[in-house]
Amino acid sequence: MPTQDRPVTVRVVPMPADTNSMGDIFGGWIMSQVDIAGGIAAARRAQGRVVTVAVNALEFKKPVFVGDVVSCYAEVIRVGKTSITVTIDVYAERRAVPENVKVTEATFTYVAIGDDGRPREVPPPQPSPTSGQEGGLSDP
Ligand SMILES: CC(C)(COP(=O)(O)OP(=O)(O)OC[C@H]1O[C@@H](n2cnc3c(N)ncnc32)[C@H](O)[C@@H]1OP(=O)(O)O)[C@@H](O)C(=O)NCCC(=O)NCCS
């Protein structure tokens, strides 16, 4: 399914406080949104707590501007014994002109953990009311 036909995992508008002194959006702000979106997809698949173990890839392809509507689409691409790998595509809808451009591509890995903070096995996938409807809910 084309990315933009999937339901969005995180949608947010950057504010002036998210910029550096030159008025450009911090890459770290986008990374944070990406991590939140990937974490949502991973936690759903893990049916519980996860932590980020690795940023496998991250590319800022186009700039993000204050006032853009930023949408993150997360999809689980691999499930290991305790780890879950997620790709996150980020699009920005510009304020001034009606265009939606891909601004960031990322792949993050999460580990399912128990109450003790140690890795736990990812359970088998379970159908849910939104299964297949939301980014990151289905196994590859
Ligand atoms: C995540 C954490 C619990 C893993 O504990 P660990 O004892 O290293 O666990 P393991 O070595 O058994 O690895 C667990 C899984 O993570 C995977 N993994 C570990 N390091 C990885 C890396 N750099 N890249 C991709 N996968 C990795 C392993 O392959 C394994 O996957 P599998 O079970 O599906 O085969 C531990 O490293 C941790 O607490 N890290 C801090 C996490 C955190 O706080 N994140 C927030 C940022 S501050």
Image (cartoon, rainbow, N blue to C red):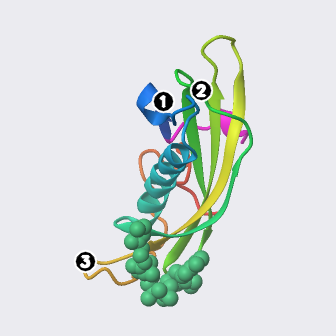
Residue beneath disc 2: 65
Query: Which residue matches tag 3?
Result: 115
Tell me where residue 76 appears, x and y as whole percent. Answer: 59, 59
- Does label 1 point to a residue whose CB lies under 8 Å from ligand 1? no
- Mark 2 vs mark 3, foreground winner is 2
> Which residue is depicted at the point 64% across and 20% down?
94
Q: Is residue 4 highlighted in magenta? A: yes
Is residue 37 visible in this depiction of the protein?
A: yes
Q: Nearer the viewer, residue 74 or 26?
A: 26
Q: Main secondary structure of the magenta part?
A: loop
> In the orientation shown, which residue stands out farthest toward the front?
21
In which quadrant is the C terminus drawn? bottom right
N-terminal label among 2 and 3: 2
Q: Position of residue 117 (x, y in %)?
A: 31, 79
Near-viewer residue (104 or 115): 104
Q: For residue 120, which numbered disc appears in the image?
A: none
Amino acid beneath label 2: Phe
Within-10-Å neighbours for mark 1: few <14, some 14–19, many 20+: some
Q: Which mark is residue 14?
A: 1
x, y (%) of residue 9?
Answer: 50, 42
- Vertical placement of 126 versus 19: above or below? below
Amino acid at dot 3: Asp
Q: Secondary structure at mark 3?
A: loop
Q: Nearer the viewer, residue 98 or 120?
A: 98
Report, in whole angstroms, how far the alpha carbon at label 2 lies from the one at label 1. Answer: 7 Å
Q: Are marks 2 and 1 in contact (CB under 8 Å)?
A: yes
User: What amino acid type should be assigned to the residue bearing mark 1?
Assistant: Pro
Q: Quadrant of residue 24?
A: top right
Secondary structure beneath dot 2 equals: loop
Percent of width and height locating residue 110: 50, 69
